[in-house]
Image (spheres, rainbow, N blue to C red):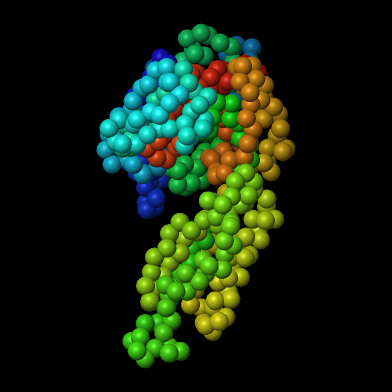
Amino acid sequence: MKAYERLLKYVAINTPCDETSNTTPSSKCQFDLANLLKDEMQLLGVSDIHLTEHCFLYGKLPATKGYENAPALGFIAHIDTVSDYCEHAIQPVITENYNGKDLPLGSSGLILSPDMFEHLKALTGHTLITTDGTTILGADDKAGIAEIMTLIEHLQSQQIPHGPICIAFTPDEEIGTGISLFDIDLFDADFAYTLDGSTEGNLQYENFNAARAKIDIVGKSVHPGSSKNVMINAALIGCRINELLPKKETPRDTEGYEGFYHLTKMEGNVENAHLDYIIRDFDKMSFEKRKNFITSIVESVNAEYGSEVAKLDLYDEYYNMLEVLNENKNVVDIAVKAILKAGVEPIIEPIRGGTDGARLSFMGLPCPNLFTGGHNFHGPYEYVCVESMEKAVEVILNIVER
């Protein structure tokens, strides 16, 4: 079965995560896909299959004769999708021989345009799988799952010699909570790759250092006609805190290796207000400065009012995996050579975000990120290139060979 054919089957199963949940998996629907994959793995002759109560699916292909002492190699993709644009069934649209022009997304009125998305220009003549404009596609990360499953089929049906191969499909990557329960010992790989990237040729082994800041503000509401020196307007304090942050250090104003503060939620009234921020930076020292700066803003507001009107909950989420992979450059070198052998030019760039591989690298499993051929994740403009999916399978076959 082709990788894209698997993808079409997998995206029919909705697996949105739930950021409000305190369980893993955050949504039970993730088990629907995990159980399907478990059955497929059994049919493909995968051994040591384990589906845990937290929706982690593990499996192995034991080394073929003569390769038992080769390093154990892992491949990982995530089962969940974002929860946005998941209100109804996903209806993929296949466009063969794309003409390089505006592509209507079903009858939604949305247009996939090369004027908006320049990478479309390089895909003229290729086959694209898009949404109908009303949902996500789910290629993030079901394209990665499809490519790994296709790899397994190739290795088994063509009897390709290989060392130990370790497979894992994980829950709740999109909300960053699942991977903390990943069983490194059960997975038992020496190093691994996540297939969770985008453009053909993409190889990523740097990502943001990430923190979250939650600020709760308690005000004092009295009649506005007699409130001088008494009222404390929590909503206005929230606005002021945001105003004290650097104006040009938001996601809209940054690119490349530039970090940012991102206000993701703001709500409140006179009595209570709440702000949610994510803080991102590639450089560890700059990352610490950003956290210290938002802490100093909250402290200054409290000093002005003479009490703790604003309370900051600040915590780290993940770190830049470059710190680990600088000590394991062979893992990156193998991927570069595998991409080149597939006739593709490696595109090495930082992830302006994070992947499960970042957390796994710091858990002792060096884990760069490889392309899947998908684009415009997390919204109705999401699509995947069929030929790029085939190249992704070729690349991971080359990694197995190396």
Q: Position of residue 186 (x, y in %)?
A: 53, 34
The quarter of the picture where residue 6 lies is top left
Name the residue located 48 percent from the left edge and 21 percent from the top edge. Answer: 124
Quadrant location of the C terminus in the rendered image:
top right
Residue nearest the observer in this picture, 367 or 262: 262
Q: Position of residue 401 (x, y in %)?
A: 62, 16
Q: Is residue 63 above or below residue 209?
A: above
Residue nearest the observer in this picture, 190 or 310: 310
Is residue 6 visible in the rendered structure shown here? no
Q: Position of residue 180 (x, y in %)?
A: 51, 45
Q: Is residue 117 above or below residue 3?
A: below
In-image side of 131 versus 300 (left or right): left
Q: Position of residue 400 (x, y in %)?
A: 60, 19
Name the residue located 59 percent from the left edge and 26 percent from the top edge. Answer: 201
In-image side of 239 versus 319 (left or right): left
In-image side of 98 versus 163 (left or right): left
Q: Is residue 355 above or below residue 165?
A: below
The quarter of the picture where residue 39 lies is top left
Residue nearest the observer in this picture, 345 or 29: 345
Is residue 119 visible in the rendered structure shown here? yes
In-image side of 200 versus 169 (left or right): right
The quarter of the picture where residue 51 lies is top left
Residue nearest the observer in this picture, 7 or 20: 7
Quadrant location of the N terminus in the rendered image:
top left
Name the residue located 50 percent from the left edge and 42 percent from the top edge. Answer: 179
Name the residue located 62 percent from the left edge and 30 percent from the top edge. Answer: 347
